[in-house]
Image (tube, grey):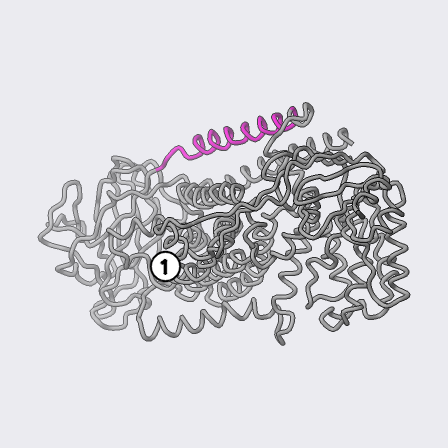
């Protein structure tokens, strides 16, 4: 269950970001540390019940990614609060924390631990991950020697091996060659359909209509519309 | 679930208490005797030597009586002269309690080893106690001395001292023998020790009970949060430490061997420089130098890695939720593995230089843990400062160099002028290094104050670091 309660996020933007003490002191003396406030999210309220698939739509810069970051705990909201029950697996970016000098095997454990998997879980799923990635004997090669396709396959295989209670998806990830794309897409659909709570951001209205129970439409940081998939999608299209 | 948690907490608390009691007992068993004696300033000092007493021949005797003020003595020294020739035979030195007429200590010296005009220090294996306000005497005679083949002792025929008299061949003469006595004060260490450790033990038990109650009622508690986080992120922490350690030497030919070679090579260079160009008369200079280098290198390496930890992992921090303190902590811990490896050369050099190895080596983990805790604290401060001001790393380069010269790594602490001593005492690294040196080189436990100073020097920066880090960590995402 996710409860987003009146969440606002504002960024302070200085025109030239001050990154050194000298610049800071000079700016302080000149009294021109001027901040421009940028409201990324403005009093967003909604609830996602257990097992629901909720889509989030909106134009670029509407605050979709910021909202996902707030829900997954990366960003603290300036105002308001988020309640989350259950473990979250964010599929925002694949292969975070991969180290080029380590082998595929070592990276499975490193990346898995970063995603919050337990050691026992990783050990029991290890074979499955390697099989899914189709890397075969390359698994013991340092990943700096991998092609970009191989890297993405490995990253996807690690990320897709969980059965989380809450899944946060930023676009359906289709990586690798055509057959792997098919495979990864069907794996994601499988993950999203198995009774898990899903927050799903996409620009493809087709996918949203197909998957989601409800839709939240964000516009300029605020919720413009929330409700039944059909209604919101129709309104958004206009 | 909560039942399992409760038993686990219960086991941890019991385990902690048992370990604590064992450590307290072991420490007392090994070092209780050493810490019973406190050094004092009022020992008997040596007088300037003016005249020799004459050859110590077979049948002749020299007796110097003196009154002891403190309640124990653990050694004395005499000034011998050899007439600038090579002598053979022996000289016997006795320490006698004049009232009871019994011999407290006796040692037969081989004359051929004595150097001309040298002070010979005799150390009592077990200090003689209960000597306060008693008249003791040093009695020196020879069973072999013949004319032309005997040594002599220096004395001062002008000096007069209260309660001291010198007899040469049983005749009272004016003057005082050139001798010194190292007096000690016996303190009731064991009472204080058991009182102190008992109170701390009680606090541990009380805190355990407090945790237990808080867990049952589900209240917020720092200790519980910490232990839960440790269990939850143990695996991640281990993976990050392993990664840092594995990738450090990954593409170098000698690999991990560098952790081993680096301190040795630095030591050799500095040893050559400071033992030939700048003469330093530190005893056992190699070990002295190496301990300083190893600990200070660890400090530099872990801070340099910890400093960049948040900025380097910016891609992770903006994408996945991980407690951010894990990055500086994991960097420091992976340097700790390096430190462990660097301790092997220290051990080798200790063996090569025939440094006396005692149980005091077991105290080394204390100063190492303190150093690690200190480095975590500083890393937390600097890594969060680094996010907001990228100048921190350049500033740190200068500060760390200054810090190195402020720490007695290759020079003796005695060369520091008295008014600058305050700076030395404020330097945590000085305390950690000094503690380790005492434990390894002197083979005794440092005085109780040193433990306290090390603990304070480690914990205070940690607390400051935690506070600063906690206050700033939410803004990291916006600034990297």
**According to the image, label 1 marks what residue?**
B408
Residue at point 50%, 57% (across, down): B303
B342 or A234, nearer to the observer: A234
Q: Is residue B255 magenta?
A: no
Identify the image quadrant of residue B84. Answer: bottom left
Residue at point 50%, 33% (across, down): B197
Q: Is residue B210 magenta?
A: yes
Residue at point 22%, 57% (across, down): B60
Q: Secondary structure at mark 1?
A: loop
Residue B10 point in image, percent of width and height = 69, 31
Query: Image check: B404 left or right of A130?
Result: left
A94 or A209, nearer to the observer: A209
Residue B355 can be seen in this image: no
In the displayed structure, B241 sits above or below B116; it is: above
In the displayed structure, B277 sits above or below A129; it is: below
Q: Residues within 10 Å of mark 1 (few under 14, many from 20)?
A: many
Identify the image quadrant of residue B108. Answer: bottom left
Query: Image check: B406 left or right of B376?
Result: left
In the displayed structure, B118 sits above or below B135; it is: below
Residue A52 point in image, percent of width and height = 84, 38
Q: Quadrant of the N terminus of chain A?
A: top right
A211 or B359, nearer to the observer: A211
Residue A104 point in image, percent of width and height = 77, 65
Residues in magenta, as a range: B186-213
Report the chain holding disc 1: B
């Amino acid at each position: 269950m996710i409860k987003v309660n009146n969440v606002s996020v504002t960024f302070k933007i200085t025109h030239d970001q001050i990154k050194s003490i000298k610049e800071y002191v000079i700016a302080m003396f000149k009294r021109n540390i001027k901040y421009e406030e940028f409201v990324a999210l403005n009093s967003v309220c909604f609830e996602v019940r257990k097992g629901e698939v909720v889509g989030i739509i909106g134009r670029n810069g509407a605050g979709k990614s910021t909202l996902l970051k707030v829900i997954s705990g990366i960003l603290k909201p300036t105002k308001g609060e988020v309640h989350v029950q259950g473990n979250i697996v964010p599929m925002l970016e694949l292969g975070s924390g991969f180290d080029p000098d380590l082998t595929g095997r070592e990276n499975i454990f490193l990346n898995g631990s970063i995603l919050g998997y337990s050691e026992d879980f990783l050990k029991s799923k290890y074979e499955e991950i390697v099989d899914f990635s189709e890397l075969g004997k390359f698994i013991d090669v340092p990943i700096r020697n991998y092609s970009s396709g191989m890297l993405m396959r490995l990253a996807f295989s690690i990320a897709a091996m969980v059965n989380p209670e809450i899944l946060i998806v930023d676009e359906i990830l289709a990586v690798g060659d055509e057959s792997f794309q098919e495979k990864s897409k069907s794996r994601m659909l499988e993950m999203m359909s198995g009774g898990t709570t899903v927050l799903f951001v996409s620009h493809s209205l087709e996918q949203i209509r197909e998957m989601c129970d409800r839709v939240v439409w964000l516009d300029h940081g605020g919720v413009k519309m929330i409700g039944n998939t059909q209604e919101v999608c129709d309104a958004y299209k206009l | 679930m909560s039942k399992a948690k409760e038993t686990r907490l219960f086991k941890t608390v019991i385990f902690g208490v048992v370990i604590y009691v064992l450590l307290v007992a072991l420490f007392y068993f090994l070092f209780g005797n050493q810490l019973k004696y406190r050094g004092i300033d009022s020992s008997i000092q040596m007088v300037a030597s003016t005249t020799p007493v004459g050859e110590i021949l077979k049948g002749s005797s020299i007796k110097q009586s003196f009154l002891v003020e403190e309640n124990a003595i653990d050694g004395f020294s005499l000034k011998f002269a050899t007439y600038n020739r090579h002598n053979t035979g022996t000289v016997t030195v006795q320490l006698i309690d004049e009232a009871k007429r019994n011999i407290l200590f006796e040692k037969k010296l081989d004359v051929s080893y004595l150097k001309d005009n040298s002070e010979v220090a005799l150390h009592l294996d077990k200090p003689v106690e209960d000597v306060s306000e008693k008249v003791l005497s040093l009695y020196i005679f020879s069973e072999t001395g013949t004319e032309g083949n005997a040594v002599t002792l220096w004395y001062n025929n002008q000096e007069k001292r209260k309660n001291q008299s010198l007899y040469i061949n049983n005749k009272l003469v004016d003057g005082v023998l050139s001798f010194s006595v190292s007096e000690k004060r016996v303190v009731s260490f064991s009472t204080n020790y058991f009182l102190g450790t008992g109170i701390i033990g009680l606090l541990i038990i009380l805190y355990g009970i407090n945790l237990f109650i808080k867990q049952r009622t589900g209240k917020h508690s720092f200790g519980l949060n910490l232990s839960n986080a440790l269990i939850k992120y143990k695996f991640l922490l281990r993976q990050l430490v392993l990664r840092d350690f594995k990738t450090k030497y990954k593409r170098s030919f000698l690999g991990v061997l560098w952790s081993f070679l680096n301190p040795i090579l630095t030591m050799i260079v500095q040893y050559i420089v400071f033992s030939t160009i700048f003469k330093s008369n530190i005893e056992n200079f190699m070990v002295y130098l190496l301990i300083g280098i190893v600990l200070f290198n660890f400090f530099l390496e872990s801070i340099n890695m910890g400093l960049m930890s948040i900025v380097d992992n910016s891609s992770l921090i903006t994408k996945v939720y991980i407690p951010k303190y894990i990055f500086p902590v994991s960097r420091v811990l992976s340097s700790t593995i390096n430190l462990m490896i660097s301790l092997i050369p220290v051990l080798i050099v200790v063996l090569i230089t025939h440094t006396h190895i005692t149980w005091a080596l077991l105290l080394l983990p204390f100063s190492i843990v303190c150093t690690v805790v200190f480095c975590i604290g500083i890393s937390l401060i600097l890594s969060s400062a680094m996010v907001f001001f990228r100048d921190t790393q350049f500033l740190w380069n200068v500060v760390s160099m200054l810090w190195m010269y402020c720490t007695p790594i290759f020079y003796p602490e005695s060369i520091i002028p008295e008014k600058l001593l305050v700076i030395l005492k404020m330097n945590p690294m000085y305390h950690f290094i000094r503690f380790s040196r005492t434990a390894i080189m002197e083979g005794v436990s440092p005085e109780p104050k040193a433990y306290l100073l090390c603990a304070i020097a480690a914990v205070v920066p940690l607390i400051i670091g935690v506070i600063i880090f906690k206050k700033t960590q939410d803004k990291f995402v916006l600034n990297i």
